[in-house]
């Protein structure tokens, strides 16, 4: 299981970094064309739409990794005031609700992809099926559901304090 999780994390990181670098490169190319060869700018109008679509995949596909790395917003005041036993119950409740909600959103996403693909809607600039847009949240929430399930099963620990951030907070306080 640890090996599969390592492969998943590595694949996600490579995918996200690749998308980000591709977005930066394409956007830079679009700006350079508009700046240095404005007469050809209309030939590169597709770049903005590609970058927008890539941004959707970047944001949604990072959900699971962000949850696992404790990078989601959390209000911990109430949680930290609870006893250890009550915290475990609250953590299991949070993971259960997050898992159910993510599965529900994956189901909606699949329905949206099917509906939009069946409707025949196409992107005006790229001429690709618009259903691709709805694949991004579907994949993202599936990855999020996986992380909630892994946390619920105890495979990953997403609630213990992050030692790296604790050291950083200590260093900031010392300054």
Image (cartoon, rainbow, N blue to C red):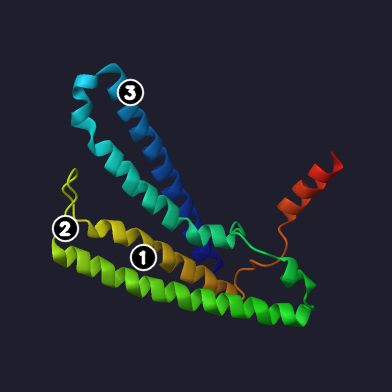
Sooner in the amino-acid sequence: mark 2 or mark 3: 3
Residue drawn at the location 76% of the way across and 53% of the way down: 166
Residue topped by disc 2: 121
Extreme left residue here? Answer: 120
Extreme right residue here? Answer: 174
- Marks 2 and 1, how far apart in space? 18 Å
Q: Quick one: label 3, few (<14), some, or many (20+) residues within 10 Å?
A: few
How far across and how far down the image is residue 157, in percent?
65, 68
Residue 138's disc is 1
Under circle 2, the secondary element is loop
Q: From this view, report whether residue 88 is shown above or below residue 156.
A: below
Residue 47's disc is none
Side (left or right) of 45 relative to 140:
left
Q: Quick one: label 1, few (<14), some, or many (20+) residues within 10 Å?
A: many
Residue 92 occupies which quadrant of the picture? bottom right
Instruction: State which mark lies toward you, 2 or 1.
Output: 2
How far across and how far down the image is residue 53, in percent?
32, 49
Residue topped by disc 3: 32
Q: From this view, report whether residue 105 is shown above or below residue 172.
A: below
Sooner in the amino-acid sequence: mark 2 or mark 1: 2
How far across and how far down the image is residue 26, in percent?
33, 34
């Amino acid at each position: 299981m640890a090996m599969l999780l390592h492969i998943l994390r590595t694949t996600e990181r490579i995918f996200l970094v690749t998308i980000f670098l591709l977005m930066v490169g394409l956007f830079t190319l679009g700006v350079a064309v508009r700046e240095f060869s404005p007469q050809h700018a209309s030939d590169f109008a597709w770049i903005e739409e590609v970058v927008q679509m890539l941004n959707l995949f970047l944001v949604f596909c990072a959900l699971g990794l962000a949850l696992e790395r404790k990078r989601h917003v959390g209000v911990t005041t109430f949680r930290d005031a609870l006893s250890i036993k009550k915290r475990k119950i609250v953590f299991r409740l949070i993971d259960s609700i997050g898992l159910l909600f993510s599965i529900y959103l994956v189901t909606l996403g699949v329905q949206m992809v099917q509906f939009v693909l069946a409707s025949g809607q196409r992107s005006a600039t790229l001429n690709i099926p618009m259903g691709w847009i709805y694949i991004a949240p579907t994949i993202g929430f599936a990855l999020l559901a996986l992380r909630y399930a892994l946390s619920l099963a105890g495979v990953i620990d997403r609630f213990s304090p992050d030692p790296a951030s604790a050291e950083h907070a200590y260093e900031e306080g010392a300054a």
